[in-house]
Image (cartoon, grey):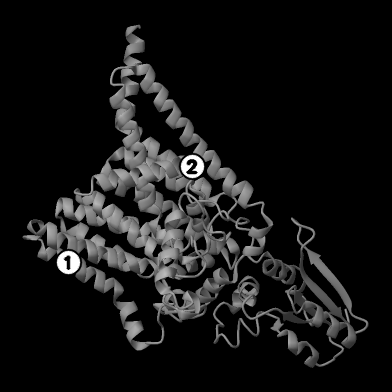
Amino acid sequence: MSAKAAKRQKNFQSFTKKYGVWLLLGAIVLIGVFFRFYMLASLPPGLHPDEAANGQDVFRIFSGDIRALYATNGPRESLFFFLQAAFVKALGNTILALRMAPALMGTLAIIAVYYWGKDWFGQRVGLIAAFFLAVNPWAVIISRDGFRASMTPLMVAMVAYMGGRAIKTRKMGYFIGAGIFLGLGSYTYTAYQLMLAAVVGLFCYILVFRRQWLKGQWKNVAAAVVSFLLVLSPLIFYSVQNPDAGARAGGTSFLNKDLNKGKPLQTLMDSTQKTLLQYNFVGDDNPRHNVPGEPYLNTFVGIMFILGVLVALYSLKHARYFSLLFIAGAMMLPAALTAEGLPHGLRSIGSAPAVMILAAIGLSYFIGRWYAIFPINSFARNIGLALILLLMSATLVQGYFAYFRAWAGAPGTYEAYADDNVAIANYYNSKLGSVEGTKVYMVVDGYSIRTVDYLTRKEADYTKQKDDADYGLRRGSGWERLEWQEVDSVPITDQPTVFIVQNNQHTQAVLDVLNVKYPQGKLNQSRSPEFSDRILYYTFEVNR
């Protein structure tokens, strides 16, 4: 090798040593950005009424109705809606505007998981865990939904990272950071509350087994508690003033007699079994939470996850392994303690950061053992490394095809996101929204109308939010909603009128009434452009 070539090689090695980790992390984050933002305006292919309800709360924010909890769609913590409001303000009341915030939170979670994994278990574990989270279809789906649960992985990872740094460095800044993120997480999703229980449990663990560490740290602990309470104070204040604004978890609990059929213990055991098996065997079959029925981890990552759990159990005497398993178990409880819709990907999403780190621990352990077996045989070491890189590449490809091909092309996905309601809104905006003098009736149920209201609301009407019984559920920007039974009572006039009829179990009854009442009316049907056998809605035009 010439001197010039040797110098180039030395410079390259110096560069990779100095910047290699950052380049790898940057590449992983870019992959995560691609998985979360690519085709975000059209995938998911619709807007579920639960997502649209967030948009209605955004309108409340614009009208000056600021709360810690909103009850438009049951009691829901508000932080996520303020983030969505920023994008609605910038992009208008579009589907993309509601989904930018979850995609951003999902991307930040990748970075947070890297720092958590690196701080507790080393750089290799941090990078692998970040990669697994970046391409995992379960995590990707939740990161692209317009639900506040998409913030949960970020908050869980940040609390764990800040808490770990606080214990290691004993610096007050990390204690305050842990308290702030612990409080912020309480504004994201009901299932996150189990993270509070995990923190309390781990503090009790320190009291019992690590009391020596607490000497001289009470001021820092107090700073963490105060910062937590300050962040949480608006939620506490609002809950005291509105005692009826409780969480929604009770209706799905395994203690609910309507669900457990008088056998709560058996129901709990069944729920726990389904929750534990969801990662490697059978996952959630709801397309809004997962690729239907598929385990949350592919075969390779799933095996590494099991290996990581075994390594953690073997190393249980070390606080960081105990804490990781404790957090993972706590964040599985929101699903395990319920008795409806199991396995449940949304309620379990808080466990995703810990699960990915456990899988990364398993793979890191495997790499370490392989290198130990072949300490000087470079050929064997390279073969093992090549196999691992191949499996990780396959994980990336599998994640892409699972979401952007299998999931995105399934008819059930379109139905799950209520693409029919979006089609109704698009028809109104393009054909009727700017037409003067035409009366428009939406024969759409009171739940589905949320999507129509959000997407058809004119900017001038953003702040005209009244109670749910009126604006948004009964009247929108230029249309009026009818229950299917009310169609017969509409007065006959010479005014041009259009009835937009949702396709459901009452459709035929509605069309029969319209045909009798307006024999000269014109009936049209709109079919899905992707699946032509699906009728999305009907229009019935009178005097046009």
Of 29 and 200, nearer the camera is: 200
Instruction: Tell me: residue 343, above or below residue 110.
Output: below
The N terminus lies in quadrant? top left
Asked which secondary structure carries label 2, the reply is: helix
Residue 389, x across and y down, in percent: 44, 31
Q: Residue at point 78% right, 93% down?
A: 489
Q: Residue at point 21% right, 57% down?
A: 174
Q: Residues within 10 Å of mark 1 (few under 14, many from 20)?
A: many
The amino acid type of the residue labelled 2 equals Thr
The amino acid type of the residue labelled 1 equals Ala
Residue 281, x across and y down, in percent: 49, 50
Report which residue position mark 2 lands on: 299
Of 197 and 436, nearer the camera is: 197
Q: Residue at point 35% right, 52% down?
A: 354
Residue 399, x across and y down, in percent: 53, 44
Tell me, for residue 223, which label it has, or none: 1
